[in-house]
């Protein structure tokens, strides 16, 4: 409830102070920056809680995996958000029409907020895993108090200074200023529980930040060279430069860190080493008795002499194999790697 109230209070303030058209521009910008955040975090959070729970008695290893998973998410989300901000000026009018050009500035201002959201979202399963869900509740309660008031005050001031544009920009600036402060405070105040500090996060993501810097400089250079070119040419060249520079820099500098972790997380859980199969304990399964199968057939009425004891035994073996495969797939997601971050 707290999260819903503060995460939608900016829409309510803009809807009250401005027209539906201005709200539409802002809503489009916020939806675009939310897409990579939601898609990536939704997939990762499905395994994060289980991973952290397995490591409750090993805080060093839990901290290491928290940093690893946060870097993996940021290595996907940050270039997407940065790329959207860089090409929004050409991309939105060309793909959505010139009438949506007013959504460019809010999108560019909110893209850094999306990167901070990725960091905040990976903290929630960690708090739950260490048995402190109250931290997340207190944090969202504080946000539910601060953000609506800040949005309304900043939007009112911006409206008097520069009309509708000033109001939207002021609301975006609240996200840009207040949200990083709150997330930074959350990380610092909970470092005794999570063993994660702000310096740890910055140090772990240094390769991603360096790659983004190279990508930004390269794209801005291409856009400056193609200033007089048509929009579609500049857009395609910018997107190509983003993909090439970021990928090449990651391949050159993060082969043994980020790329190695991607291979670990995304490898096929069914591809288990032969030695692991040899050492795995085999638990015998008891085959169903003939009398149990016969009684079940008589009770159902649909099963007659066609259902034999041999068929029932094969079904039990198949079900047991499926359960064993599911357990093996879960445990394979947690390879014991030495801490690196």
Image (spheres, grey):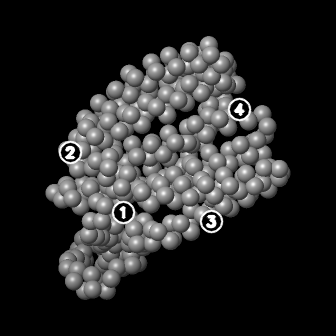
Q: Are marks 1 and 3 in contact (CB under 8 Å)?
A: no
Mark 4: secondary structure: helix
The local secondary structure at tag 1 comes to helix
Q: Report the mark closest to the observer, 4 or 3.
A: 3
| Residue at disc 2, secondary structure | helix
Give the residue at mark 4.
Answer: 102
* Residue 258, x across and y down, in percent: 42, 65
Q: Earlier in the sequence, mark 4 or mark 1?
A: 4
Pinpoint residue 242: horizontal percent, then vertical percent.
Answer: 63, 59
**Of marks 2 and 3, the one in the foreground:** 3
- 285, above or below 83, in the image: below
Residue 193 marker = 2
Q: Which mark is residue 23?
A: none
The label number, if any, that marks residue 244 in the structure image: 3
Discs 2, 4 touching: Cβ within 8 Å? no
Which residue is drawn at the image coordinates 44% and 60% (left, top)? 207
Residue nearest the viewer, comparing 202 with 308: 202
Mark 1 vs mark 3, CA separation in Å: 63 Å
Q: Earlier in the sequence, mark 2 or mark 3?
A: 2
Q: Which residue is mark 1?
A: 300
In the image, residue 229 lies at what x, y percent?
Answer: 83, 52
């Amino acid at each position: 409830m707290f999260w819903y109230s503060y995460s939608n209070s900016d829409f309510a303030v803009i809807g009250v102070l401005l027209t539906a058209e201005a709200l539409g521009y802002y809503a489009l910008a916020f939806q675009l920056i939310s897409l990579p955040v939601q898609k990536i975090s939704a997939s990762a959070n499905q395994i994060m809680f289980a991973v952290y729970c397995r490591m409750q008695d090993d805080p060093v290893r839990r901290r290491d995996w928290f940093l690893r998973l946060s870097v993996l998410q940021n290595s996907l989300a940050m270039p997407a958000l940065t790329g959207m901000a860089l090409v929004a000026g050409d991309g939105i009018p060309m793909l959505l029409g010139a009438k949506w050009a007013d959504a460019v500035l809010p999108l560019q201002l909110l893209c850094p907020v999306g990167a901070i959201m990725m960091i905040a979202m990976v903290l929630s399963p960690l708090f739950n895993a260490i048995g402190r869900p109250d931290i997340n509740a207190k944090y969202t309660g504080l946000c539910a108090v601060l953000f609506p008031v800040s949005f309304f005050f900043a939007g009112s001031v911006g409206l008097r200074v520069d009309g509708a544009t000033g109001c939207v920009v002021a609301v975006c600036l609240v996200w840009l200023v207040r949200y990083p402060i709150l997330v930074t405070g959350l990380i610092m105040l909970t470092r005794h529980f999570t063993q994660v500090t702000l310096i740890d996060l910055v140090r772990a993501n240094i390769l991603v930040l360096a790659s983004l810097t190279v990508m930004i400089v390269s794209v801005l250079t291409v856009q400056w060279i193609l200033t007089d070119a048509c929009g579609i040419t500049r857009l395609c060249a910018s997107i190509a430069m983003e993909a090439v520079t970021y990928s090449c820099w990651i391949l050159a500098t993060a082969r043994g860190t980020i790329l190695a972790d991607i291979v670990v997380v995304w490898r096929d859980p069914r591809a288990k080493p032969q030695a692991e199969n040899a050492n795995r304990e085999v638990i015998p399964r008891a085959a169903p008795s003939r009398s149990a199968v016969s009684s079940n057939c008589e009770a159902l009425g649909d099963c007659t002499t066609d259902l034999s004891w041999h068929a029932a035994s094969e079904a039990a073996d198949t079900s047991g194999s499926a359960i064993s495969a599911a357990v093996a797939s879960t445990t394979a997601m947690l390879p014991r790697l030495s801490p690196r971050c």
